[in-house]
């Protein structure tokens, strides 16, 4: 898909055979060739661009692609060793803070043991004194001078012990404060200045987006009452249609955690056709788990299990092997499945698996993300922030602030891992800019693809000449691509 979008989308392009190869031009980060049809990371690079070129041949587009800016070249040469040093420096900073945390944890442990021991000794001492006082009261004898002295010593000992524990507790406070100082010393606390205010929307819009993300996270985590309270206090208007899917999913998941399959089965049956379109096996897994519960009931449930097995008939073609295993387990039902070759059917891990399967398939069906967008953004930010802060320092040092001026792009590619691969991106081979909603990719009638901004710049006298082939065409004939 990438090679087609980079050169030609139509079937008649002469270079659409095996001679075409995908090139990733050298950017500021690691050069990388994306796998065809694979997704790109959520954090995309503004300097990593791709275009297609016939092997050993110079295309017409080469003369139109401007060379990288000098500022970008200088930044790239500076960033390569800097990023390596950043990783080592960050690990040392984390280790320094971790050492302070370990000291605090050790003091907490020591204080807890000392506190417990001191209180036990004090309780034992007071218990003995109480027994002596009770004995003297039963005999009706007046309080002796010795016993009065012991009571005075006991009160003094209680006071000294409490003062000693309070003093030790104050020492822990100073250790905790040293952890905060270590964090301030090793990490830059002013993270708001990583990017200029020009790349953000207005403060009101930022606040509204953040509040909405928090509310969605709370709904997704099942903290419904907290989400409602936040909506009321922030005067955020959340539509009932937005809340309804989360309410339904949480209700069903809560039932599954209670090992109640009824709501989940009802939901799966009502959405059977759409689940089949997703190649989901959710309904079969729910029926299988219900069948296993009947097997766990012993020989008394054998007839009921056999009767329930008719639910497997629609799934026989795709899950024949699993159905055979469940039917074979009936042979050992009278002897006990726990000591049979089918004991794995009674494993409690099936309940955790069905919760994960339901969450994944239900979210896919309803167009929701399995993981909270807020948690994904936070985790990605934790990975990206140290790199971005180092980039900002280098940009300021080399006085090339124009390198980072776009809202939707970063100056280099940041590795976030496979979990953050969501979608493909297309970069215009003419302007070397990643396309966006305001600057989408446009397919020309000859099949080549460029960005809308590039198309507007190439218009001459109301006509457009394709930068890849000599075909002239009307700019209005270009069609927007969505991929």
Image (cartoon, rainbow, N blue to C red):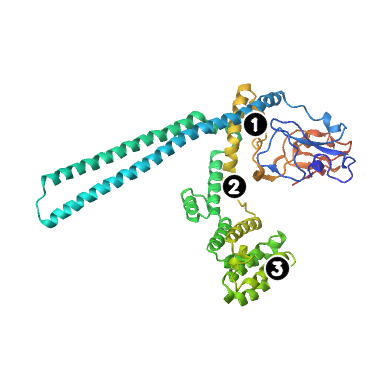
> Quick one: label 2, few (<14), some, or many (20+) residues within 10 Å?
some
Q: Nearer the viewer, residue 347 or 170?
A: 347
Sooner in the amino-acid sequence: mark 3 or mark 2: 3
- Identify the residue shown where x is 62% and y is 29%: 391
Q: CA distance from mark 3 to mark 2?
A: 41 Å
Badge 3 marks a residue whose secondary structure is helix
The span from disc 1 to disc 3 (Cα, nearest Å) is 62 Å
394, above or below 179, in the image: above
Residue 324: assigned label: 3
332 shown above or below 429: below
Q: Nearer the viewer, residue 143 or 321?
A: 143
- Secondary structure of the residue carrying tag 1 is loop
Please rate how many residues cluster around mark 1, counting C-alpha atoms within 10 Å: few if below 14, some from 14 to 19, many from 20.
Answer: some
Disc 3 to disc 2: CB gap under 8 Å? no
454 relative to 176 in the view: left or right? right
Tag 2 residue: 373
Which x, y percent locates residue 420? 65, 44
Residue 343: image x %, image y %?
61, 64
CA gap, disc 1 to disc 2? 25 Å
Q: Is residue 266 visible?
A: no
């Amino acid at each position: 898909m990438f090679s087609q979008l980079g050169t030609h989308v139509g079937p008649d392009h002469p270079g659409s055979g095996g001679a075409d190869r995908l090139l990733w031009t050298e950017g500021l980060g690691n050069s990388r060739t994306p796998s065809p049809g694979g997704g790109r990371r959520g954090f995309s690079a503004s300097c990593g661009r791709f275009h297609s070129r016939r092997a050993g041949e110079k295309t017409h587009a080469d003369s139109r692609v401007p060379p990288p800016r000098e500022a970008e070249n200088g930044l790239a040469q500076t960033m390569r060793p800097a990023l390596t040093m950043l990783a080592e420096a960050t690990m040392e900073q984390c280790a320094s803070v971790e050492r302070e945390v370990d000291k605090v944890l050790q003091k907490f442990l020591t204080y807890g043991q000392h506190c417990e021991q001191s209180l036990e000794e004090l309780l034992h001492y007071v218990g003995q004194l109480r027994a002596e006082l009770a004995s003297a009261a039963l005999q009706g004898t007046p309080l002796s001078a010795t016993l009065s002295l012991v009571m005075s010593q006991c009160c003094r000992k209680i006071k000294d012990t409490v003062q000693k524990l309070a003093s030790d507790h104050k020492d822990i406070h100073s250790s905790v404060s040293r952890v905060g100082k270590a964090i301030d010393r090793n990490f830059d606390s002013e993270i708001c200045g990583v990017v200029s205010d020009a790349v953000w929307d207005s403060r009101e819009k930022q606040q509204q987006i953040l509040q909405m993300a928090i509310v969605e996270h709370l709904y997704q985590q099942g903290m419904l009452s907290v989400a409602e309270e936040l909506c009321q206090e922030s005067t955020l208007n959340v539509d009932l249609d937005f809340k309804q899917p989360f309410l339904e999913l949480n209700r069903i998941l809560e039932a599954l955690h209670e090992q109640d399959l009824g709501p989940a089965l009802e939901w799966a049956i009502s959405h059977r056709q759409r689940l089949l379109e997703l190649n989901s096996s959710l309904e079969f897994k729910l029926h299988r788990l219900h069948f296993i519960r009947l097997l766990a009931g012993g020989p008394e449930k054998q007839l009921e299990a056999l009767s329930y097995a008719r639910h497997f008939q629609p799934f026989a073609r795709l899950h024949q092997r699993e159905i055979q295993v469940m039917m074979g387990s009936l042979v050992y039902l009278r002897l006990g499945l726990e000591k049979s070759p089918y004991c794995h059917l009674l494993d409690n891990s099936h309940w955790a698996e069905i919760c994960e399967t339901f969450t994944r398939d239900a979210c896919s069906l309803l167009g929701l993300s399995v993981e909270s967008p807020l948690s994904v953004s936070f985790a990605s930010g934790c990975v990206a922030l140290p790199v971005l802060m180092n980039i900002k320092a280098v940009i300021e040092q080399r006085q090339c602030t124009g390198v980072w001026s776009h809202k939707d792009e970063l100056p280099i590619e940041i590795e976030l891992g496979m979990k953050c691969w969501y979608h493909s991106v297309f970069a215009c081979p003419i302007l070397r800019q990643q396309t966006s909603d305001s600057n989408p990719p446009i397919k020309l009638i000859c099949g080549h693809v460029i960005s809308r901004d590039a198309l507007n710049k190439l218009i001459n006298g109301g006509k457009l000449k394709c930068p890849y082939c000599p075909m002239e065409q009307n700019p209005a004939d270009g069609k927007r691509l969505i991929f």
